[in-house]
């Protein structure tokens, strides 16, 4: 049977991403992959997880194996609120909703806010997983320019005004402000104030997706104070995840914001998965309650910082002239720019031949640009893999640029 005639409009919009097609070429186990934005698998908090599970009470163990409320395991909701409050966020009058990964949180807010044809503002470049959700719901992502300090406030103000004048007022701004995926850049503190002021003036909600917030290796925690921490108008819906502070395998994230928004997302969630994994929620509640986040993230900040510095050193010593990259202060990625006119997809194919992989830049752009960009992830590679991988990548770059 040909099912195309019975697919919904949304179902017809679902296509395989260019990244997935290219990454099928990187399945060779001999290939060093600097593509996936994955945590360091050799340093998950295995011992802490065993300690939590071994210490479960009968009631905790029963809760872990049973269905739970859509609104989340109550002790976890309480612990998430306390965790966010410790970062300077006023959680009074806010609602927390645990979700099945931060990806589900993006999907829920899109479902609640957007009808097909609605416009959403995103950074250029931006997280490709969010763009896939927006397009899947028929929303139209419109880009806002970035530089080394994140969103350019004047560009944001102008973009909102022009879209509104054209009858396409955006539903929200989606931003990944801290050690951004894919660019590695961070929205400066002064610009966070300006972005919030501009969005408040235009009545535009902000979806603050902040998964790398704790993984800084330059500066201190206060240097990365969230947009939500300065929000006095309930404009910001903040998204978080346990993927970077515990494990992505437990598939657990959360949203925090105005009850009228988060409560509606909870209602939408009822029809999707009834509840996020109870096992994961009981585990995460214990992880937060026992104070394991800070020791783990402190250890990982050192590990990721060393990997990042090595990556930047090897890029500087190996790459041919005309190639540049960002210098992240945290997170998993650096963003590489080839000379104008060069094609990162051609470089990818050449690099695969030399047994190294990365992610091409065009899919992270919603405006057709990015053909000469690429994302390098250093987070899950060993030091030796970083050295060898960048040497191989540099050889491929010299070939295509010559």
Image (tube, rainbow, N blue to C red):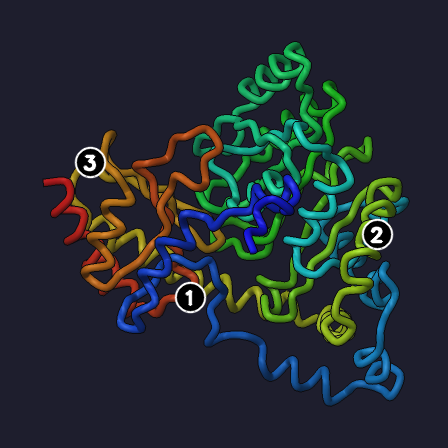
| Quadrant of the rendering where the N terminus is positioned | bottom right
Answer with left or right where residue 185 lies relative to residue 372.
right
User: In this view of the protein, can residue 223 be seen by the observer?
Assistant: no
Residue drawn where x is 16% and y is 39% of the image: 321
Secondary structure of the residue carrying numbered label 2: helix
Residue 89 versus residue 215 in the image, above or below: above
Which of the 4 image quarters holds residue 187?
top right
Nearer the observer, 401 or 196: 401
Labels 2, 1: front one: 2
Q: Which residue is mark 2?
A: 266
Label 2 and label 1: CA atoms lie apart by 34 Å
Secondary structure of the residue carrying numbered label 3: loop
Q: Which residue is mark 3?
A: 322
User: Sequence-wise, which precedes: disc 3 or disc 2?
Assistant: 2
Labels 3, 2: front one: 2
User: In this view of the protein, can residue 264 be seen by the observer?
Assistant: yes
User: Sequence-wise, which precedes: disc 2 or disc 1?
Assistant: 2
Which of the 4 image quarters holds residue 358?
bottom left
Q: Residues within 10 Å of mark 1 (few under 14, many from 20)?
A: many
In x, y percent, where is residue 77?
Answer: 83, 61
| Quadrant of the rendering where the C terminus is positioned | top left
Secondary structure of the residue carrying numbered label 1: loop
Q: Which residue is mark 1?
A: 380
Q: Residues within 10 Å of mark 2 (few under 14, many from 20)?
A: many
Residue 360 versus residue 27 in the image, above or below: above
Residue drawn where x is 68% and y is 63% of the image: 252
Nearer the observer, 260 or 242: 260
Q: Residues within 10 Å of mark 3 (few under 14, many from 20)?
A: few
Query: Which circle marks residue 33 in the picture?
Result: none
Residue at the outermost left position:
402
């Amino acid at each position: 049977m040909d099912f195309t005639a019975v697919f919904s409009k949304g179902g017809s919009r679902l296509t395989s991403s260019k990244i997935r097609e290219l990454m099928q070429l990187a399945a060779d186990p001999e290939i060093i992959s600097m593509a996936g934005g994955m945590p360091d698998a050799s340093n998950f908090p295995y011992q802490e997880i065993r300690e939590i599970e071994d210490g479960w009470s009968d009631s905790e163990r029963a809760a872990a194996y049973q269905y739970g409320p859509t609104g989340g395991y109550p002790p976890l909701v309480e612990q998430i609120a306390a965790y966010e409050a410790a970062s300077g966020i006023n959680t009074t009058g806010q609602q927390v909703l645990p979700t099945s990964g931060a990806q589900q949180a993006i999907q829920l807010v899109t479902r609640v806010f957007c009808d097909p044809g609605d416009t959403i503002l995103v950074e250029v470049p931006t997280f490709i997983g969010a763009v896939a959700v927006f397009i899947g719901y028929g929303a139209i992502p419109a880009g806002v320019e970035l530089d080394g300090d994140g969103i350019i406030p004047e560009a944001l103000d102008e973009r909102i005004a022009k879209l509104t004048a054209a009858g396409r007022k955006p539903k929200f701004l989606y931003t990944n402000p801290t050690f951004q995926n894919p660019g590695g850049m961070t929205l400066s503190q002064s610009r966070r104030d300006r972005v919030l002021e501009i969005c408040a003036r235009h009545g535009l909600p902000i979806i603050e997706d902040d998964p790398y917030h704790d993984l800084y290796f330059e500066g201190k925690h206060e240097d990365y104070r969230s947009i939500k921490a300065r929000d006095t108008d309930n404009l910001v819906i903040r998204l978080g995840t346990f993927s970077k502070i515990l494990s992505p395998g437990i598939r657990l994230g959360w949203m925090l914001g105005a009850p009228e928004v988060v409560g509606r997302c909870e209602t939408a969630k009822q029809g999707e998965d009834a509840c996020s994994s109870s096992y994961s929620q009981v585990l995460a509640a214990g992880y937060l309650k026992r104070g394991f986040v800070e020791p783990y993230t402190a250890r990982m900040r050192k590990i990721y910082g060393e990997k990042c510095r090595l990556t930047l050193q090897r890029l500087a010593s190996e790459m041919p002239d005309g190639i540049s990259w960002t210098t992240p202060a945290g997170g998993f990625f650096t963003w590489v720019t080839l000379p104008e006119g060069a094609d990162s997809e051609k470089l990818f194919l050449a690099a695969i031949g030399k047994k190294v992989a990365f992610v091409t830049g065009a899919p992270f752009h919603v405006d057709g640009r990015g053909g000469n960009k690429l994302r390098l992830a250093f987070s899950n590679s060993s030091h030796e893999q970083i050295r060898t991988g960048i040497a191989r990548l540099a050889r491929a770059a010299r070939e295509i640029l010559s």
